[in-house]
Image (cartoon, coloured by chain):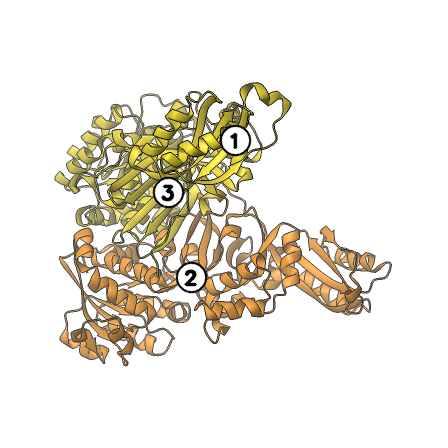
Chain colours: A orange, B yellow
Amino acid sequence: MSASEECNIVLVGCGTVGGAVARLLTRQAEHLTRRVGVSLRLRAIVEADFTHARELSLDEDLFCPDLAQALSRHPTDVVVELVGGTTAAHDIVTCALKAGKAVVTANKALLAHHGPELWALARQQGTCIGFEASCAGAIPIIAALTGQLAADRIEALYGIVNGTCNYILTAMTQRRQSYAEALSEAQQRGLAEADPALDVSGADSAHKLAILAALAFARRIDLERVHVEGIDHLQLQDVRYGQELGYVIKLLAIARRQEEGLSLRVHPAFISTRHPLAWVTGPFNAVSVYADNAGHTMYYGRGAGGRPTAAAVVADIISIALGNARERFQHLKLWPDRCPQAEQLDIRSVRCRYYLRLQVADRPGVLGTIAKVLGDHDISISSVLQHEPRSDEQSQGVPVVITTAEALQADLDAALSIINNHPTVKAPCVCIRMVQEHPESIE
Amino acid sequence: MSASEECNIVLVGCGTVGGAVARLLTRQAEHLTRRVGVSLRLRAIVEADFTHARELSLDEDLFCPDLAQALSRHPTDVVVELVGGTTAAHDIVTCALKAGKAVVTANKALLAHHGPELWALARQQGTCIGFEASCAGAIPIIAALTGQLAADRIEALYGIVNGTCNYILTAMTQRRQSYAEALSEAQQRGLAEADPALDVSGADSAHKLAILAALAFARRIDLERVHVEGIDHLQLQDVRYGQELGYVIKLLAIARRQEEGLSLRVHPAFISTRHPLAWVTGPFNAVSVYADNAGHTMYYGRGAGGRPTAAAVVADIISIALGNARERFQHLKLWPDRCPQAEQLDIRSVRCRYYLRLQVADRPGVLGTIAKVLGDHDISISSVLQHEPRSDEQSQGVPVVITTAEALQADLDAALSIINNHPTVKAPCVCIRMVQEHPESIE
């Protein structure tokens, strides 16, 4: 649609985000019309269960049990999908696009799995999809990648894109809680689901990374080939050793050009306390982008929650109402439906620095043995940290922390398979990647 | 213009930024066309002196001594004004708008002084002005205010928008340089002008604040009524006392709703080391925005330099080429040419916390006297810091550092006029505002 005086909206899903969108569109209707110059009219709320909608005192005339019925009864320009998941949501988005309606969605799983197919359908129907709310909530990172940065050459993107994980890691770092304690507190405060698997496994971050990297590099991303590690195995002692060395632990979503291709990965990483991403604490999100001309830019804000996510949904509706979203979708050559497949590197080809913690027998020559194995595999040691042993540590071995220079993951794997089998090594080596400040290309 | 296959550009001014724009448009032409789906064609470079353009090996066929001549010879969609200042630049922008051309400019002084008049002219001519590069270089803050945040209610905006000042203050904080040493180093490194007055006086930040606040609050801003203090009077000892108390000094551009109106001011301020803006070091810029729905978002990046600023200019050109800039300009009710005048508060009506340093005689009862005067003026003391005196300090008095709770500037002024005249006070009190973390309205 091009800008007219009215934009008619059907909202599907009225949970936390849907409810916030409905309230925003109804309670702030006059303010929105005054600011935007187009009247944003919520025509129907499609939901199976209207309990939450009633709790929010939304107008019962808006309630409708079925999308097809809503579309047949109301003039509709935009369908907002906020049901989540990849089954019903896929049907809703497909149905809306086939009816020629623009779609706004916060559904990262749907786009990470089915993006190219849905974008192609939108293009075929002459419409578009707004998805700012799918990645990092209120942070306008999709707007930045398809706006300010659209014509730049992006070298790398580093994101803290899961508020649950960042809350847990901040609690471990600042309050010295164990992973289990921090998770439990996050659950009590409504910052983690009862089943936290999607968040803490890194899967949610991988969905967002797939969407962001596709736009940043104008490539189709294979989600299955994104390397994903979660935070659920992290131990407090490693967080603390890292701090001692001047590093903070974060769950990072990383997309980075290497000579041979694109490295796409989600994993816990130590970053220097001097890096801007180290400052992002609690449930906040941030995305750092390194572009050839713009240099380093970073975007920070609330990655989740009803109102912040609703703000992103409404911004997308406005962009569609003004015709901007469609112009960008039709002209810019960034959307995966018309981009080639990325050359995604295997994690074994990634070069990185590493933090290693070994539990070794307190006996002469052990460090020498380990250092030799690393050296034989072309891995240089940057620093070694070994405290005088506490009496309770003797049986599990003494912790030795080693940081390496940049090394190839394949070389490290080979070295660790030897080290872990050495009789003086009491437990499998703990290995956490270290992420360096990305160089800028600005002269 | 609405999106067509070609966008023809005339560039006026070929200095650091102009040269970078010209190189970007010519050297990366193919990449731009491929990404943007519209061919961005640089048709002419208007300059009086082509020395720099020749050094950059720009095509001499592009050189043209006069804008009118360039417009008569070449099809033109966008005129890019990068000459700076408010005299010639005003003529260039007016001439381009009157010819119905869209304008892109990085000129904050021009827009801060003449924005409403120029936006009105653009509206009358059915065209628009892109000015992303005028505030905070590569940071897409104009895009955020007129995009993601356009329909939100913004409560406050805090910006570090002058890289020269931030570089100097970072050097004073981290390397304990005096103001003069830090300025001299910034000049040597090309980060400060030979005459640094526009930057260090806060005037440049005030220009940017006027532009940002106009969009954030949809109000016309009177630049003359923005309260401006620079950094040139700051003393290293105050930076260090602030650090001791957990604060970092920054030159902040602040726009904040208070009950009675809008507080607009540029001044050095102590902010907590825990606030995200405290992390912004060296020549980097950042803008923190607190909005009713989105909550706290922050935008960080390079605020100056040829290529980062050129990236913002090219992003504006693309937005114009796709028709997006004009749609937003025509529909959104944010631009000052059709907004009411802001109710700008006098600095005396601003409520703030204060850092005070007094040089007092080392004698009983002095602190009590000062505390009584503050109390009489409704100013509560938050903390007092007084070190044991060094022998060399006796003659100039002993430094006593006081931080206050939130107080009215008018009350503070009245208290200080009494304190500064007290016989035990050896020198006028040093007074630096303290900026608290802004509360978010997110439930």
Chain letter for mark 1, please: B
Q: Which residue is mark 3?
A: B158
Chain letter for mark 2, please: A
Q: Which residue is mark 2?
A: A340
* Tag 1 secondary structure: strand
Residue A417, by quadrant, is bottom right
Specify the farthest residue to the right. Answer: A364
Label 3: how many Cα within 10 Å (few below 14, some 14–19, many 20+) = many
* 1 or 3: mark nearer the eye: 1
Q: Amino acid at mark 2?
A: Pro
Q: Amino acid at mark 3?
A: Tyr
Name above or below for residue B264 compared with residue A38. above
Q: Are marks 1 and 2 on the same chain?
A: no
Q: Amino acid at mark 1?
A: Val
Q: Which residue is mark 1?
A: B400
**Observer able to see residue B236:** yes
